[in-house]
Amino acid sequence: MSSNSSSSSGPSRSGEDEVEKEETMRIVWGDPENDVFDVTNQILYRTVSVQKYYSTDTLSEDGDDDDDEVGLAATFVRDPHYESKEIVKCKLFTLPELIAVASAVGFRLIDSFGDLDVNVRFDCENAQNMVVAFRKD
């Protein structure tokens, strides 16, 4: 079970006298320690979390040894008061199950891939997804 995350951000103003701070929302898919997999029914109970981060200015050195310049750098800090967490049921299908369902409604398998890149085969070590193409008979 892997954990994936994505984020989006935008500026925010809290008040007239405050400096504009950037906020970022991070979405975390999966919690390897707490997510449960129902082997019998092939259902993954996956944790999905939304976390809020905001920028804060910190003093930083520029990294050059020639001078002692110090500047401001934005550091993102997690907002401890904002997190939303849900458990989402994900039904996992095997390739034979998908083929059987498709056949039952008049489709036939054209090909299967391990990602949206057609060069990543379904049985490739780098395959992260299951992408299947069917055609109506």
Image (cartoon, grey):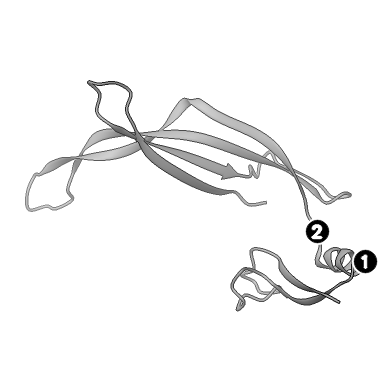
Residue sitting at x 7%, y 53%: 66
Where disc 2 sits, the SS reads loop
Residue identified by numbered label 2:
93
- Name above or below for residue 15 compared with residue 105: above
Q: CA distance from mark 1 to mark 2?
A: 16 Å
Check disc 2: other Cα within 10 Å, few if <14, some if 14-19, many if 20+.
few
Residue at the spot x=25%, y=23% of the render?
18
Based on the displayed image, in which of its 4 quarters is residue 132 positioned? Answer: bottom right
Q: Residue at x 70, y 65 (%)?
A: 130
On-image quarter of the C terminus: bottom right
Q: Nearer the viewer, mark 1 or mark 2?
A: 1
Give the crowd class for mark 1: few <14, some 14-19, many >=20 residues within 10 Å.
Answer: few
Q: Which amino acid does the dot numbered 1 rest on?
A: Ala
Q: Amino acid at mark 2?
A: Phe
Vertical arrangement, residue 41 with respect to residue 94, above or below: above
Residue 105 is left or right of residue 62, and the answer is right
Question: In which image quadrant can residue 28 be found?
Answer: top right
